[in-house]
Image: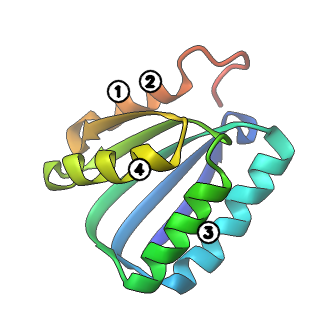
């Protein structure tokens, strides 16, 4: 499965593991879960870990843009973790679609990304 999801901090943080190439069908699995958390929690924080990630199909790219526009103000922090080749592209791609504070971390900095994501949260991290 190219997308794996795991809730942390009582649902206020969502860890997303991406691998392979994302398709429109992957978004049809992923988006309802994110929307359920947003509806329950209000704003959420996301950590997206890209491992052996090859990008999006055109259908998936369109789904991503629609998601980003709909949830422009719902993502408070976005940590991107992966190979350096994705850093510039992902940061540039995500920025116009969200108010979230976005920070990129190399794959070796996963623990640091988790700490940054949960920094300043009112409830203790689970």
Residue 39 against residue 61 in the figure, above or below: above
**Pointer 2 residue:** 116
At mark 2, the secondary structure is helix
Percent coordinates x, y for residue 96 in the rendering: 44, 46
Q: Nearer the viewer, mark 4 or mark 2?
A: 4
Q: Earlier in the sequence, mark 4 or mark 1?
A: 4
At 73% from the left edge and 19% from the top edge, which residue is drawn?
123
**Residues at circles 2 and 1 in contact by the CB criterion of under 8 Å:** yes
Q: Which mark is in front, 3 or 4?
A: 4
Mark pair 2, 1: CA separation: 6 Å
Q: Nearer the viewer, mark 1 or mark 3?
A: 3
* Residue, disc 4: 94
Q: Give the SS element for disc 4.
A: helix
Residue lying at 51% horizontally and 67% vertically, measured from the top left: 64
- Of the numbered discs 3 and 2, the one sitting upstream in the chain is 3
Provide the secondary structure element on which disc 1 rests. helix
**C-alpha gap between disc 3 and disc 2:** 23 Å
Q: In which quadrant of the rendered view does residue 11 lie? A: top right
Q: Could you tell whether 23 is left or right of 110 in the image?
A: right
Q: How is the image coloured?
A: rainbow
Q: Find disc 3 in the rendering and name its residue.
A: 30
What kind of element bears circle 3? helix
Are there few (<14), some (14-19), or many (20+) residues within 10 Å of tag 4?
some
Residue drawn at 74 percent across, 58 percent down: 35
Q: Residues within 10 Å of mark 2 (few under 14, many from 20)?
A: some
């Amino acid at each position: 499965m190219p997308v794996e999801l795991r809730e942390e901090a009582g649902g206020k943080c969502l860890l997303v593991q991406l691998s392979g190439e994302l398709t429109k069908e992957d978004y049809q699995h992923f988006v309802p879960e994110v929307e359920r958390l947003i509806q329950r929690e209000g704003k959420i924080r996301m950590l997206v870990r890209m491992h052996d990630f090859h990008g999006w199909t055109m259908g998936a790219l369109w789904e991503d843009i629609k998601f980003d526009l709909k949830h422009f103000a719902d993502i408070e922090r976005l940590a991107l973790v992966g190979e350096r080749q994705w850093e510039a592209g992902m940061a540039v791609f995500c920025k116009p679609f969200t108010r979230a504070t976005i920070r990129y971390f190399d794959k070796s900095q996963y623990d640091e990304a988790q700490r940054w994501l949960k920094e300043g949260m009112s409830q203790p991290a689970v």
